Image: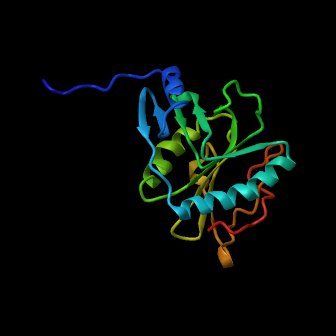
Amino acid sequence: MAGISRKPWISPQDYLAAERTAEVRHEYVDGEIFAMVGASRRHATIVGNLFVALRQTARARGCQAYANDVKVRVEAANAFYYPDLVATFAGGDDDPHVVKDPVLVVEVLSDSTEAIDRREKRTNYQKIPSLREIVLVSQTERLVEVIPPRRPRLDRRCAAGRAGHAGLARSDHSAGGGVRGLKASRVS
């Protein structure tokens, strides 16, 4: 068919170089880049509240937590994503903008990203050997889903309690732990 043009394939190295100076953030999936949309104030509030709670717990366990602007590398899918929150024990990654060995990834769902977060990202995150849990947080209802990385049928849904306190009340990133020990906090 004449007139159909293919997008040029972009190497991970070219993507990372361009991303350092880009005015808009992009995610990368196997040679293609996708611009990211801006977040709503509600989304930003939820991410901020979760980060405050996660960071304190992570620090106490020798773990680092990051919000929004740090990419996660999924080697098995040849992808880079910007999760809303990420935690890692690996402080010495060779690129200061990329986490390669996350133990926790959190995505706050929005109308424009929920399908991708639930399918593509979840499937790809589950390929990360170091990952212990994926957490999906709803903006529209008091619901937090804690998903084991390689057991998709064992989803644990935690409904938020009174006053918006999430059931994300278990965060322990010590050996074998997931998000246990993280005190329930207001997320919206």
With 77 as the anchor, is 62 left or right in this view?
right
> Which image quadrant for residue 87?
top right
Q: Where is residue 66 in the image (x, y as percent from the top left)?
A: 69, 45
Against 141, residue 125 (above or below) is above
Point 42% across, 40% down: residue: 35
- Looking at the image, which is closer to me, 177 or 28? 28
Q: Position of residue 14 (x, y in %)?
A: 49, 21
Point 75% across, 66% down: residue: 184
- Looking at the image, which is closer to me, 187 or 77? 187
Farthest residue, direction bottom:
162
Q: Position of residue 3 (x, y in %)?
A: 15, 26
Q: Dividing the image into 4 quarters, which one contains the N terminus?
A: top left
Against 43, residue 18 (above or below) is above
The mark tally for this picture is: 0
Q: Dividing the image into 4 quarters, which one contains the C terminus?
A: bottom right
With 188 as the anchor, is 1 left or right in this view?
left
Against 89, residue 148 (above or below) is below
Judging from the image, the colouring scheme is: rainbow
In this rendering, does residue 172 appear at all? no
Point 46% across, 32% down: residue: 29
In this rendering, does residue 29 appear at all? yes
Against 92, residue 165 (above or below) is below
With 170 as the anchor, is 85 left or right in this view?
left
Q: Position of residue 33 (x, y in %)?
A: 42, 33
Point 70% across, 24% down: residue: 94
